[in-house]
Image (tube, rainbow, N blue to C red):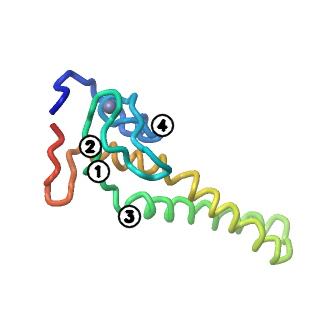
């Protein structure tokens, strides 16, 4: 309610992947690693009711699972390494990849929810 200024529509992927506010594209969405900030510091958008739930994790599981299984099969067929090499490489790739993807994926989900005015039970007022 604080700012009724005009904000041009920005891509939810552009703002989300940069972890920026879905309305102005400038302010930070997160106040911690995955903690959503109360308000945008630039345009004062209320972010306190934003809840991406399990959405980011589901997409990361699907995307990362596909990538890791494909890479593991290619690696195995190309080099036929001993099993301990697989057990050393893939947990690091999975944990590192998941941690690297969580923030931008959650940012995209929050931006998509904002742009589509989505919320549980339609209870969030986006104005
Ligand atoms: Zn903002």
**Residues under labels 2 and 4: Cα distance?**
15 Å
1 and 3 marks in contact (CB < 8 Å): no
Residue 78 percent across, percent down from the top left = 81, 64
Q: Is residue 85 above or below residue 26?
A: below
Q: Which residue is mark 1?
A: 50
In-front residue for pair 121/77: 121
Q: Quarter of the image holding residue 111? A: top left
Q: Which residue is mark 2?
A: 114
In front: label 2 or label 1: 1
Residue 13 left/right relative to 4: right
Q: Quadrant of the N terminus?
A: top left
Q: SS for tag 4? A: loop
In front: label 1 or label 4: 1
User: Mark 2 or 1 closer to N-term?
Assistant: 1
Label 4 Cα neighbours within 10 Å, binned few <14 / some 14-19 / many ≥20:
some
Label 1 Cα neighbours within 10 Å, binned few <14 / some 14-19 / many ≥20:
many
Q: SS for tag 1? A: loop
In-front residue for pair 35/78: 35
Residue 72 percent across, percent down from the top left = 71, 67
Q: Quadrant of ligand 1?
A: top left
Q: Which residue is mark 4?
A: 18
Using the image, tell me which numbered label, if any, was put on residue 54.
Answer: 3
User: Mark 3 or 2 closer to N-term?
Assistant: 3
Q: Quadrant of the C terminus?
A: top left
In-front residue for pair 82/94: 94
**Residues under labels 4 and 3: Cα distance?**
20 Å
């Amino acid at each position: 309610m604080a700012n009724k200024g005009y904000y041009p529509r920005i891509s939810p992927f552009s703002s989300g992947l940069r972890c920026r506010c879905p309305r102005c594209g400038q302010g930070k969405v997160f106040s911690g690693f995955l903690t959503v900030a109360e308000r945008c510091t630039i345009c004062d958008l209320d972010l306190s009711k934003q809840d991406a739930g399990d959405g980011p994790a589901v997409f990361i599981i699907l995307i990362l699972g596909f990538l890791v299984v494909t890479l593991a099969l290619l690696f195995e067929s190309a080099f036929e390494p001993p099993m301990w090499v697989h057990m050393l490489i893939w947990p690091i790739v999975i944990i590192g990849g998941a941690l690297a993807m969580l923030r931008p994926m959650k940012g995209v989900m929050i931006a998509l929810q904002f742009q589509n005015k989505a919320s549980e039970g339609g209870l969030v007022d986006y104005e």
